[in-house]
Image: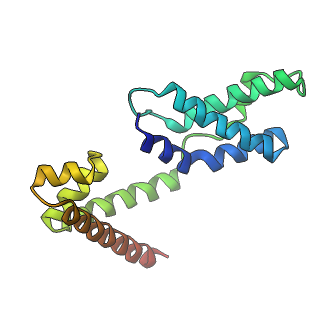
Amino acid sequence: MRESDIRRYYDLHGKELENFLTRKLNCSQTAADLTQDVFLKLVSARPEEPLQNPRAYLYRIASNLLVDHFRKTGSRDTVSEKSVLESLPDEEPDPERTILAQKSVEQLRNVIRQLPQRQREVLILHKFEEMTYAEIADRLGLSKNTVMVHMMRALSTCRTYLREENSKDG
C-alpha cells in the first residue's frame, strides 16, 4: 500500500471515523487521538495490496481501539466488540445514492471518451493505472511538463462537464 492510498483513506474516512468515535466517547480530544491511532495502525500494518473495503477495515481498527480504550480506562464495563460493531453506520449506500453514483460514473466515462487522445491517455495512466507524471512522460515520449499540462486540461474539462451536467439536474 502506498502513502498516497493512506492519505486518500484519511481524506475520505478520517472525519467520519472521528465523529463516530466522538459519539462513542463523548470526548472529541480522545476521539481525535484514537482517529490518529487508527491511521498509525494502518501505516504500521502496511497491507501489500490496496484494501478491498477501506472503510470497513478502518472501522474495524477503530472499534478495536475503542474496546481497548474502554478496557484500559474501565469507563464502560459492558462494552463489547459486538456492541461497537452493531453501532457502525451501514456500509451499503441507499438506492438513491447508488443510482446517483452510477449516473456520475457514466457521465465521467462519457467525458473521458470525448477528451483528446493525449489528455485521455494521460488521465487514464495517472488516475487509473496510478503512474507518476515522470513514468507517463517516459512511456509516451513527452516531457513531464507536457504531461502535467495534459492532465490539467483533462481534469478541467471533466470538472466543467460534470458541473454543467449537475446544474442541469439541480
Q: Quadrant of residue 38?
A: top right
Q: Is residue 94 visible?
A: no
| Residue 104, horizontal then vertical, whole percent | 39, 61
Q: Residue at x 49, y 41 (%)?
A: 6
Q: Residue at x 22, y 66 (%)?
A: 150
User: Compared with residue 149, is residue 56 higher up or lower down, i.e. above or below?
Assistant: above
| Residue 61, horizontal then vertical, whole percent | 62, 29
The quadrant of the rendering that contains the N terminus is top left
Q: Is residue 60 left or right of residue 52?
A: right
Q: Is residue 159 left or right of residue 119?
A: right
Q: Residue at x 19, y 68 (%)?
A: 114
The figure's colour scheme reads rainbow
Q: Is residue 27 visible?
A: yes
| Residue 29, horizontal then vertical, whole percent | 79, 45
Q: Quadrant of residue 108?
A: bottom left
Is 145 or 76 nearer to us in this picture? 145
Is 106 or 78 nearer to us in this picture? 78
| Residue 113, horizontal then vertical, whole percent | 20, 62
Q: Quadrant of residue 164?
A: bottom left
User: Compared with residue 159, is residue 67 higher up or lower down, i.e. above or below?
Assistant: above
Q: Residue at x 57, y 40 (%)?
A: 91
User: Compared with residue 93, is residue 86 higher up or lower down, i.e. above or below?
Assistant: above
User: Compared with residue 13, is residue 155 higher up or lower down, i.e. above or below?
Assistant: below
Q: Is residue 165 left or right of residue 112?
A: right
Identify the residue at the far left of this view.
141
Q: Is residue 31 left or right of residue 93?
A: right
